[in-house]
Image: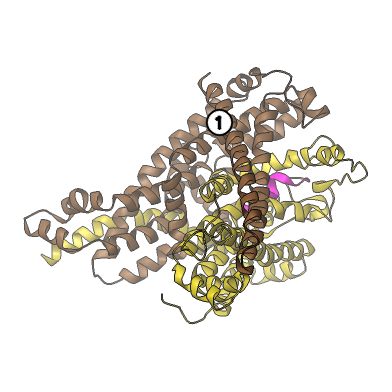
Amino acid sequence: MQHGKYRFIAGFLVAPLSLYLLFVIWPFIQSIYYSFTDWTGLSPDFKMVGVDNYTKMLDDDVFWKSLQHSLTFALLLPLITVSLALFFAFMINVGGRRRKGAAIAGVRGSGFYKIVYFFPQVLSIAIVALLFQFAYNPNSGALNSALQAVGLDSIQPDWLGDPDLALWCVMAVLIWSTVGFFVVLFSAGMASIPKDFYEAALLDGASRFTTFFKITLPLLWDTVQSGWIYMGILALGAESFAVVQIMTVGPSGGGPDYSTIVMPLYVYQKAFRDGQAAYATTIGVALLLVTLLFAAIVMRLGRRERLEY
Amino acid sequence: MKTTNIEPTDADSDADADAGATRGDDPMGKQGADASPKPVKSREGTVLNVFSHGVLILWAFMVVMPLLWAVMTSFKTDRDIFISPWSLPDKLHFENWSRAWSSAHMSDYFANTLIVVGFSLVGTLLLGSMAAYVLARFEFPGNRFIYFLFIGGMSFPIILALVPLFYVMQNLSLLNTLPGLILVYIAYSLPFTVFFLTGFFRTLPTSIAEAAFVDGASHTRTFFQVMLPMAKPGLVSVAIFNFLGQWNQYLLPTVLNTEQDNKVLSQGLVQLAVSQGYKGDWSGLFAGLVMAMLPVLAAYIIFQRQVVTGLTAGALK
């Protein structure tokens, strides 16, 4: 009996686990090891060089730029996206005209808003990035010609070509494509908060804005926190890679004078453009540390008593 | 020809829905104003109502505009795209679409994506549910360790593993092949799938599986004939999640699949954009973009409820 059970467990785990170990875990371990070597990726020969790659990294201006941009993403993107989404979700759920017998009500057409807001979430980030690259085009893009149409001929920014603007343009695209997901997520959470809480608070003379900070936000805290971490990981990882690589100019992306370079893109360029695989993994390890640190900080700062209702 | 038929209707229904909401909003705002000489509370509610509709419509507009603009642009000539980006097409240039479909290889990209996502999705669900079932329902040494090994993969930056993975794939002769890409998609979809389904299997009642087992069914048979059918809602959610993730995948194929004939949709489009920069066929590129957007948007509108549940389920846990 016991024997049969273990054979079954092993039989069910062997395929998924070996696939996962071979393609995910093993490369992760390898890359940490490679970061202490001088491996180019082009030839199979390499030797250990200690922490040379790490000291090189600390002297690399482009690395610091990429770190700075990635940190900006990790700090600002969750803040802006989550705040906007909370705002929209609150408007959807509480902004409705007062109906008989209910203290608060959702706006009319709330279903419509939720459907439309979610559109970008189902599109590939690559497609979104391409689309906005054209919208930002300084000569014939949608944005500048819209500015012209309303008589603002003098304001014709270079958008992605302007080193001071490019990073913000990229961030705007990431915000555009992710807000809807969080609106729907928070909306679901808000809908499950009992209406009596609002009723009682409004009877006691609280304004609707007070109820947001005193009722909605505390009861939604867990969701907000996990949304925050999710958005941060996304802003540090594959999404920012795709957006920056596709949208910004320069050899294989990164913007004028590396003004939009982010860590995952720099890893990619070092490994697959410059033939410095070992150095690329070093930057990758730094990115891993930043990601873990970010998650740890958010969980630490966000810890508070869980409210049951 | 079929895609071209679907396309304008979709754009129309978007516009209609938008206009419908605007129309519906106006009378309501007036009613709200009429009701204002009531107590102060109610006025606050009315102001809030008008304000919230204003903001919500503004954002809806900002979401829909770029998409409609892309649809519109895909029917224009290159000249019109450059001279007047916001004007309506002089006539519907369907030739952009056929050019993108055949000579710009969109048909190949679609076919490759279908193959890769089809096999990956089945593989992910099968392997993911097997691992999750065992981890959720059986006590054995190392259970917790394997579980955390799987879910740890959710927060690691994938790019870090991709550098060595490139060479692992090369050594296995899987680089630039569709089977290789499928295996990688499955492996990288496992963390979330295992995490989600483990949670789901834990919520299912144990008594039915025990009954089946007492009746003489083997563990394997119990899994396939009793547990999997019971887990269907969870499987649907996680399938939708993985379908969108794999269909839209950009990073993995960009690194691991650079062979022209094997390109999948999103990377193919990006390459198209780069090469069209030289050829100047922007209208064809926009047609390709819209072509790639429409199937997922249409599927989303049809399966709206399931998609939202599938995508938000993970974050709510």
Which residue carries the number 1 mark? B10
Q: Which residues are magenta?
A: A239-250
Task: Kindly identify the amino acid type of the residue bearing the numbered disc 1.
Answer: Asp
Chain letter of mark 1 equals B
Residue at the image point whose x is 49% and y is 71% from the top: A199
Chain depicted in brown? B
Check the picture and name the quadrant holding the C terminus of chain A.
bottom left
> From the viewer's perspective, is B40 left or right of B297?
right
The part of the image, by quadrant, that contains residue B33 is bottom right
Q: Which chain is yellow?
A: A
Q: Is residue A240 magenta?
A: yes
Most foreground residue, B122 or A98: A98
Residue A53: where, in percent of width, then height? 68, 67
Q: Residue furthest front?
A: B37
Magenta span includes A9: no
Residue that lies at the very extreme toward the right in this rendered image = A154
Q: Is residue A176 something one can see in this rendering?
A: no
Tell me if A161 is positioned left or right of A24 in this view.
Answer: right
